Amino acid sequence: MWPARVIPFLSSYLSCLQCITGKHNEIKKEVWREIPTEFSQIIGLKLLYLFQNDLAGVIPNELSSLKNLTKLDLSINHLTGPIPFGFHIPQRFGLYSRLWVVDFSDNYLTGRIPPYLCRQSNLMLLNLESNKLYGNIPAGVISCISLQQLRLSGNRLTGSFPSDLCKLPNLAAIELGQNKFSGPTPQEVGKCQKLQRLDLSANQFTYELPKEIGNLSQLSDDASEEFDKEDTLTLIKPSLLTTKDVRSPSELRSVESGNGLSHGDPEEDKTE
């Protein structure tokens, strides 16, 4: 909850306030320990940056009423619980959402990814890395036709590589490392013509990488990650691991494997 002295100050500005930025431990613990539900009253809010604070508690379901929100960054906090189903983009945000950045990475979120988290066309970055999410990647992700970056590394996700991901025409980064995915990497990955980063490391994928990956001419490890949280979005970060048993190494510079992909013998999962 907000302190009583804060609410009167904001009350006359709720309709026109467009940006709230409290980053890098700028929020004092005595002011906010959790994300205030009162943010839902700021109907004109477009940017909500609360990354790298010591915020705890759950993601308020009330944030779903912010239909003008374009960027939502709650990363690097201590948030817990599931991603609220009332919050998820299709039911409340989805039909009119302007969101193009959602970053909940580096928290302690649990549960499954909501099945229709992306049923709208504007979302460009979905970053849920470094949480405790489990289950499959929901099929509804393929409805995000503008999606450019899908970052799900460092969770407990299972199932196979979703071949339909490569139906997304603008997808440039798929990061699935450090999960519990299994099965072969489908040939369809070679159809992700705009793919510039592919991270499959530390999973239980089997068999060789499909030769179709050699078609991904835009894969690169010499571009830097630059996501300016207040201005722009660039799609690449450099490769951290070398490829293993890749059929076309001259063309594949930014595929991370480390899955025991050759000879059909998966290595033991190294993540818990």
Image: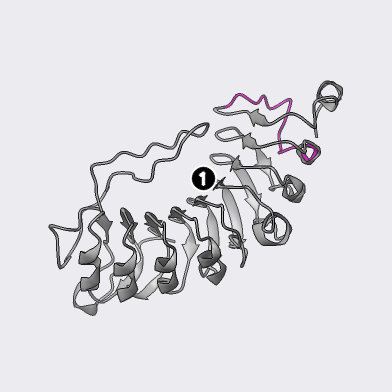
Question: Relative to 16, is 34 above or below?
Answer: below
Image quarter of residue 153: bottom left
Question: Relative to 11, is 147 above or below?
Answer: below
Q: Which residues are magenta?
A: 25-38
Q: Main secondary structure of the magenta part?
A: loop
In this rendering, would 20 be left or right of 142?
right
Question: Relative to 229, is 261 above or below?
Answer: below
In this rendering, would 68 be left or right of 204?
right
Residue 56 rendering spot, x and y as whole percentages: 66, 41
Image quarter of residue 132: bottom right
The image quadrant where one finds the N terminus is top right
Q: How is the image coloured?
A: one colour
Residue visible at 69% across and 58% down in the picture: 95
Residue visible at 14% across and 60% down in the picture: 249
- Residue at numbered disc 1: 106
**60 or 44: which is nearer to us?**
44
Residue 145 rendering spot, x and y as whole percentages: 50, 61
In this rendering, would 16 be left or right of 76?
right
Residue visible at 34% across and 45% down in the picture: 236
Residue 229 rendering spot, x and y as whole percentages: 51, 34
**126 or 134: which is nearer to us?**
126
SS class, disc 1: loop
The amino acid type of the residue labelled 1 equals: Asp
Residue 151 rendering spot, x and y as whole percentages: 45, 53
Asked if one can make out residue 209 in the rendered structure from this viewpoint, the answer is no
Image quarter of residue 82: bottom right
Asked if one can make out residue 35 in the rendered structure from this viewpoint, the answer is yes
The image quadrant where one finds the C terminus is bottom left
Q: How many marks?
A: 1
* Magenta region includes residue 27: yes
* Magenta region includes residue 261: no
